[in-house]
């Protein structure tokens, strides 16, 4: 095969999907192996419905994987180490807010500064709630 006719699969730029054969085992339905240019399976993936939408399941990973949703931001896999880091980050944010409140009690901030800090704190709390919810699923 000439190099002009190589596909992204042949060049190793993209993993090639291989559907699992359907059979008596309902667990085989919807599973896809993704093979590299050497025809070795890099990962197996499938999607299942969950209470709040769908979950993408990935098995057999030997290398890091980023998930890009609709061409936008990357989804970070949540593991125990990341959960610990999220808890520490939230603790630091809460201590920072307590320090701000203490300084504000002395009149160190203008009304505009206070309003801006309150908006940022509400945003931080919303992000904290989201991260905590995702961490609890891990």
Image: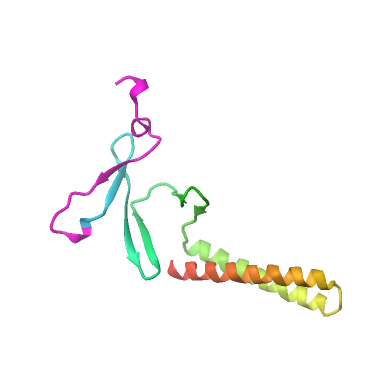
Quarter of the image where the C terminus is located:
bottom left
Residue 10 falls inside the magenta stretch: yes
The answer to which image quadrant residue 18 occupies is top left
Q: Residue extending furthest bottom? A: 105
* Location of residue 95 by image quarter: bottom right
Q: In this view, does 82 lie above or below 97?
A: above
User: Which residue is outermost to the left?
Assistant: 24
Which span of residues is magenta-colored?
1-27
Nearer the observer, 39 or 121: 121
Q: Is residue 109 left or right of residue 67?
A: right
Image point 64% across, 68% down: which residue? 123
Name the image colouring: rainbow
What is the x, y in percent for residue 108? Answer: 86, 73
Most extreme residue toward the top, as rendered? 2
Residue 88 percent location from the top left of the image: 60, 68
Where is residue 100 shown, x and y percent of the image? 77, 73
* Residue beneath the point at 44% across and 48% down: 64
Q: Compare residues 56 and 61 and report the one nearer the observer.
A: 56
Total labels: the figure holds 0
């Amino acid at each position: 095969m000439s190099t002009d006719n190589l596909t992204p699969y042949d060049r190793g730029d993209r993993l090639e999907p291989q559907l699992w054969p359907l059979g008596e085992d309902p667990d085989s339905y919807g599973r896809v192996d993704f093979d590299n240019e050497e025809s070795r399976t890099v990962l197996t993936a499938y999607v299942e419905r969950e209470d709040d939408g769908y979950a993408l399941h990935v098995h057999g990973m030997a290398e890091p994987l980023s998930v890009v949703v609709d061409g936008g931001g990357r989804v970070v896999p949540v593991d125990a180490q990341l959960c610990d880091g999220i808890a520490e980050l939230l603790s630091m944010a809460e201590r920072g807010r307590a320090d701000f409140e203490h300084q504000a009690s002395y009149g160190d901030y203008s009304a505009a500064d206070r309003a801006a800090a309150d908006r940022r704190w509400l945003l931080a709390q919303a992000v904290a709630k989201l991260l905590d919810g995702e961490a609890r699923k891990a």
